[in-house]
Amino acid sequence: MKERINLTSLDARIPALRAETPGTAHVMHFNHAGSSLSPQPVLDAVFDHLTLEATIGGYEAAALANDRLEGVYASIAHLLNASPDEIALVENATRGWDMAVYAIPFAPGDRILTSKSEYASNLVAMIQIAERHDVTIDVIPNDEHGQISLDALATALRQPVTAVFVTHIPTNDGLVQPIEEIGALIREHRPECWYVIDACQSAGQIPLDVERIQCDILSATSRKYLRGPRGVGFVYIRRSRIDTMEPPLLDLHAADLTSPASYVMRSDARRFENWESYVAGRLGLGAAVGYALEIGLGAIQERVQRQASQLRGRLQEDAGATVHDVGEVQSGLVTFSLPGVDAAAIVQSLAEKRINVSLSNIYRTFLDPAQDAIGTFVRASVHYIATGEEIDSLIAALPRSGRIG
Ligand SMILES: *Cc1c(COP(=O)(O)O)cnc(C)c1O
């Protein structure tokens, strides 16, 4: 880890960090995995640019912001230990993942590996790709901790594999997949295999280093743990892969016409972008990445895990809840249920007390039969700004199981 972890200093900074997050005055937010509360520097970056657009014109404002827009690529590259030409800015994580994955040159007979907790949108795309190119998808079983079995993966990698897809922190089972160990296995057995990471819930929550992960593609969104605005996301593509990839969609930003009947694609990751974009949102994302880097991802991860583990303990001990999280390392996404109480009713009753949690829905995953009942679970996602008092309030506000329903 590059940055120095100074735990005391992050704990001591929480009141100040909360004070510059306007939303903390209005709600107790346990929905950072849905969409976080942005801090003031992020809001300023967005509002200032919208004001500039309204004042001098959208294209004129973008021209003035050009250096700062380039800086957004540099900040994201820094966050991932990548280089700016390996970053594409897109509308959201899914579109980034899609643009890159649909550009992998699959051929009939190819084999894809994935885990049981792959994000549903990724699975939809994978199925479409499998049908289109006559490719098979093998789902690697879980180990006794409920995360991908490295032994089963190593066995699967003995046969040819074209691509491995892993969601780093799944939407609804608490775990953190061991993506560096997975990357090491892939590179040992199948150096040419495409390794694709969905880092949508981990960007801003956990340090990410594409050299240590050894991935080719990594996608993430702005609005979740990075605390940026909605409507923007990014994808990293390894330099050595870009030339071999044909984006599923191209426009005059991604490619240049060289004659009435020919074009040449950009040589950097921006061949996966499109021309029109939410400029204020991109600047807000840049501010959010800078904000996270200044706090330090190691310190953020440590505090998120500490707050989440406090919440898991209180849910079990003081609220009689069942916590459904698995994995050797657990994330800030806490999934639970109260025996005999409808999850939607819990979400609703907390909302009335201005406590934001969300419902974990079955449609997000299908690969794990153990999660058949997931539609009945509540997800409380914790970020570093969550305090012990907020956790107390959440516990106190829960309907007592057995008392209701
Ligand atoms: C939210 C989420 C996504 C989708 O992100 P968007 O920005 O909404 O496209 C992808 N993967 C995981 C694991 C998620 O939780």
Image (cartoon, grey):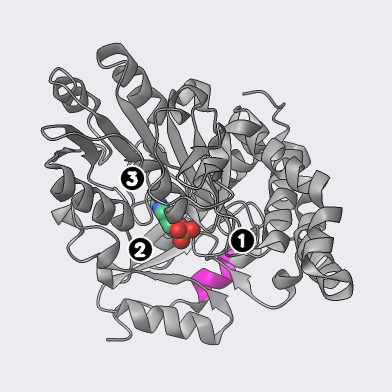
The magenta span reads 391-396
Choose between 89 and 188: the one closer to the eye: 89
How far is mark 2 from mark 3, CA to CA? 35 Å
Mark 1 vs mark 3, foreground winner is 1
What's under tag 1, amino acid-wise? Glu
Q: Position of residue 324 (x, y in %)?
A: 30, 56
Kindly identify which numbered label has been placed on residue 276. 1
How far is mark 1 from mark 3, CA to CA? 21 Å
Q: Is residue 339 above or below residue 261?
A: below
Which quadrant holds residue 318?
bottom left
Mark 2 vs mark 1, foreground winner is 1
Residue occupied by mark 2: 336
What's under tag 2, amino acid-wise? Phe
Residue 393 part of the magenta-drawn span: yes
Q: Quadrant of the N terminus?
A: top right
Q: Is residue 324 visible?
A: no
What's under tag 3, amino acid-wise? Tyr
Residue 66 part of the magenta-drawn span: no
Which quadrant holds residue 366?
bottom left
The mark that comes first in sequence, 1 or 3, is 3
